[in-house]
Image (tube, grey):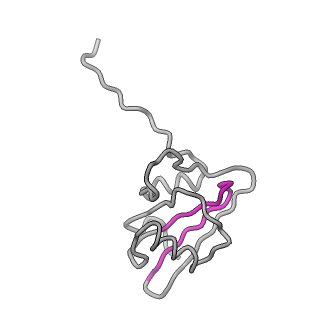
Amino acid sequence: MKSIFDFSDLYIHRDPVDLRKSISGLSVIVESEMKLDLKASALFIFTNLRRTHMKILYFDRSGFALWLKKLEDSKFSWPKSAKEETVSIKAKDLALLLEGINVWTRFKDVHFERVL
């Protein structure tokens, strides 16, 4: 089984999808809505409306694979304020997201003119 760190690109579909969709249905979303190449070395990440389930789709040399994670008592943090339909994410951030950490809230940049 591959690791999320084996992929060069990771893309989140910002809007929730009906996760009754499997490989074929999610592949259509990747091509038609996200406008991405299914055969790229990439992970395509989806969630449901309640953000309790996440599916991750990818293609390797032999075919498609689909990972599923279901949360019992919490929700995935998700890029709600992003303007783009497709949001790029780093593998280390996806790992944190899968652990339940909100990677979308970051410290603001601090600018100063002098120290003391």
Q: Quadrant of the C terminus?
A: top left
Residue lying furthest front: 32
On screen, residue 98 versus residue 37, left or right, reads right
On screen, residue 67 versus residue 38, left or right, reads right
Identified at 53% across, 76% down, the residue is: 1
Residue 21 at what x, y percent from top left? 63, 74
- The residue range painted magenta reads 44-60
Query: Residue 38 versus residue 72: which sits nearer the camera?
Result: 38
User: Which picture quadrant has residue 20?
Assistant: bottom right
Residue 75 at what x, y percent from top left? 66, 50
Residue lying furthest top: 116
Query: Residue 104 versus residue 96: which sits nearer the camera?
Result: 104
Marker count (numbered)? 0
Verify whether residue 59 appears in magenta. yes
- Main SS of the magenta part reads strand
Identified at 45% across, 81% down, the residue is: 60
Identified at 44% across, 56% down, the residue is: 87
Residue lying furthest left: 113
Q: Is residue 102 above or below residue 72?
A: above
Q: Is residue 89 above or below residue 9?
A: above
Residue 44 at what x, y percent from top left? 49, 67
Residue 89 at what x, y percent from top left? 43, 56
Residue lying furthest right: 73
Q: Is residue 35 above or below residue 106?
A: below
Verify whether residue 94 appears in magenta. no
Identified at 58% across, 48% down, the residue is: 77
